[in-house]
Amino acid sequence: MKYHEKNPRWNFPHYFYTKESHLDSNDMMQQIFIDTSFFAGHPRSNSQEMKEKQLNWLRKVLAEGKDKYKWRFVYGHHVMYNSNQKLKILKSIQY
């Protein structure tokens, strides 16, 4: 997040946040940005407290906006689900 000081195009206001956009019609889209490092076991992000805080926030965001948005996208850096049995990332986030 401090990289923003060097490059203003790099804009991360928090580890997890949302943006909403109006589409061509009256429909709305929500973009949800999360820091998947907390779930992927990244050494700098091994805080269980931050992981739980982010999960609770994500569950709240998903529950509160379910009728408001036509489209919702969740973005993260690390893979959340795939067919590789060796990767066990984000099993706890199923909604």
Image (cartoon, rainbow, N blue to C red):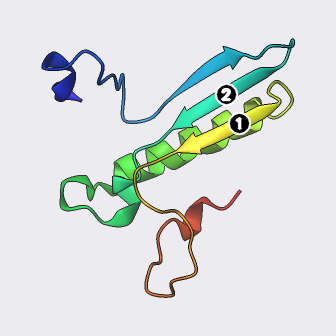
Residue at the location (21% across, 21% down)?
A: 4
Q: Position of residue 76 (x, y in %)?
A: 46, 48
Image check: 95 left or right of 83? right
In screen coordinates, is 72 left or right of 84? right
**Residue ID at (40%, 61%):** 39
Q: In this view, does 58 lie above or below 4?
A: below
Q: Which amino acid does label 1 sit on?
A: Arg
In the picture, the quarter occupied by the N terminus is top left
Q: Using the image as rendered, state which of residue 56 and residue 45 is in the foreground.
A: 45
| Element class at badge 2 | strand
10, 34: nearer the viewer: 10
Q: Is mark 2 in CB contact (under 8 Å) with mark 1?
A: yes
Residue corresponding to mark 1: 72
Q: Provide residue 65's location: percent of width, then percent of height.
A: 76, 29
Pick the residue in front: 70 or 42: 70
> Could you tell me which secondary element the residue under label 1 belongs to?
strand
Name which of mark 2 and mark 1 comes first in the sequence. 2
Q: Which mark is residue 3?
A: none
Kindly identify which residue carries mark 2.
Answer: 30
Q: Residues within 10 Å of mark 1 (few under 14, many from 20)?
A: some
**Residue 95 is drawn in which quadrant?**
bottom right
Tell me if 10 is positioned left or right of 21 in this view: left
Q: From this viewpoint, which residue is outermost toward the front?
A: 24
Q: What kind of residue is marked 2?
A: Gln
Residue 59 is drawn in which quadrant?
A: top right
As drawn, 15 above or below 42: above
On the image, the x and y values in percent for residue 38 come to 36, 55
Q: From the viewer's perspective, is residue 90 above or below residue 21?
A: below
Q: What is the x, y in percent for residue 12? A: 35, 26
Q: Residues within 10 Å of mark 2 (few under 14, many from 20)?
A: many
